[in-house]
Image (tube, grey):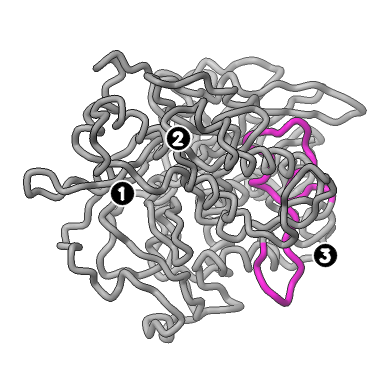
Amino acid sequence: MFLPLQLGLFVLGSFVAAQPVQDGKEAEYMCLDSNFEAFTNKKIKAHQWTPCSSNSDIRNLHPSYLRSSSSASTADQPATSALIDISFKCYHAPRNVCEKAERAFQKAADMISSVILFREPIKVNATLVSFCQMGNECGKNMMTLGGSSPARAMPLLNDDGLLRLHPQALVKQYMLQDHPAFAEYDILSVFNADAPFWFEEDGLPIDSNQADFSFVILHEFMHGLGFYSGWNEYISSRALTPDPSPFMANQLIRMLNPTSTSALHSTQFLESAMDRLMTVLDYDSSSMTISPSMSVSDYTSQLNRIQAVSISDLTTSPGFAAAKEMGYLATKAGSLGLDISPDLDPIVLETALQPFQPGSSISHVDYATYTKSPDFLMRFMQDRGLTLAEAIKRGGGTGPIGPLLLRVFEELGYSTVNHPNTVPPLLFYQQQGMTDMVMNELQSSSHHGLRRKHQHHHNSVNATSKDGHVYISASSPGAVEHLSFDLLLYFTIFCIIIM
């Protein structure tokens, strides 16, 4: 009997709005923090916006805010990497399993730091815990292997004028002299002690129903370092947008003070850092107005230009055609990719799943294209009963992190063994966050009659079996109703499936 196994990472979401000066005092810069306890405790919020202002006075811009190809700080990048520091805790598992898991975490960390040259150490909070005992996830028909999330995401402005959420692990590598305050950890990682993990050090053949623990760790750490998209079905099941938190916050600001415009955020939708690389590869519908080789960020710019005061106004605006086109592309095989170099074909993303699967679609590479390639790691399905070493051999690679995946991280701004002097993308850290008034309103679920809708991962998956394969799909957040008084706290799970 096959057990469908799922592991996840929460996608970043919620809100951010512009930051005015109030009463001569600069309000707080806000970052989006994750809470790993929410993975097993459904009553805990998965994400919340937290003050993270730098202690420095940023009203006068420091030169380190602007990064360009002339940045001298990249010239002395050493050919060695800072370490990945694992803070490990283990509960509800035999001592020998805890010890094996800790060693597997460290081995996976060493694999990563052998090819990605970190300028600053990466700190990971890793926990092995029984999801059955902690979260009452005890069913035999579905088992979550685990998940990882950036501990903190920071809104940074890129040189194309778009504000994007950058994982803290990535921001640390930019070596900015002044920056948003860092959280204690860079990545939060939780894994299920009840899952049938296989450990290489046992020296035993992998069972047909087992999952290689090292494979799972590596896949999830890649998400934690920044391999994920911010596009999802936030507004409609037939349209995709980046995180609409600023748009929702603007609605709330208008509701609280209809005459105020100073606090409104010009950026209405937040992409992830990786979305800067996403491009349209193919289309075949005469009803679409897509331009070949078009950057997906052009859609975001189009959405940001929409002048709407409600969800209804937004979805009926001519500019919302961009979201509908993305909904079409996200379910058409071979339609979206990552443009990593003018000398290489784009990486094909997973868009063959129908309907759109939050957590699987877009945030992984195309399954059919990369299963037997060196870049197999970031497919949405993992082969059951196949070790990491066997997957590497089948793909003809030399390690678990393939050359194309490595190029993605270089484009994000990480240095690698192939390009130790990678120049980070031009970005700008500006004092941009939430007004104190809005923060107070949003942190209270009952004040002024506001109601918080929280999308939980525990009700987001379903499974069917067909032809010996296990298909698991995450349900969409659902079509959002007219939201004059509702604020959504968004997150989704990135899923890797065992077949």
How far across and how far down the image is residue 402, in percent?
70, 63
Dot 2, how many residues are within 10 Å of its Cα: few (below 14), some (14-19), or many (20+)?
some
In the image, 223 versus 436, the foreground residue is 436
Q: Do the residues labelled 2 and 3 touch (CB within 8 Å)?
A: no
Query: Image point 44% across, 67% down: which residue?
Result: 159
Q: Name the residue tied to disc 2.
A: 308
On screen, 273 above or below 160? above
How far across and how far down the image is residue 460, in percent?
61, 23
How far apart marks 2 and 3 lie (CA) works out to: 51 Å
Specify the amino acid type for callout 3.
Gly
Dominant secondary structure, magenta:
loop
- Work out whether mark 3 precedes mark 1 in sequence or the reverse, and give the earlier one: 1
In the image, 302 versus 221, the foreground residue is 302
Query: Image point 45% across, 47% down: which residue?
Result: 150
Left or right: 150, with 416 as reference point: left
Specify the amino acid type for callout 1.
Ala
Q: Name the residue tied to disc 3.
A: 396
Q: Give the range drawn in magenta.
A: 339-368
- Work out whether mark 2 precedes mark 3 in sequence or the reverse, and give the earlier one: 2
- Work out whether mark 2 precedes mark 1 in sequence or the reverse, and give the earlier one: 1
Which label sits in the foreground, 2 or 3?
A: 2
Please state, as top left, top right, bottom left or bottom right, where the N terminus lies in the image: top right
Query: Image point 40% across, 20% down: which residue?
Result: 484
Question: Residue 104 got which mark?
Answer: none
- Residue 475 occupies quadrant: top right
Q: Are marks 2 and 1 in contact (CB under 8 Å)?
A: no
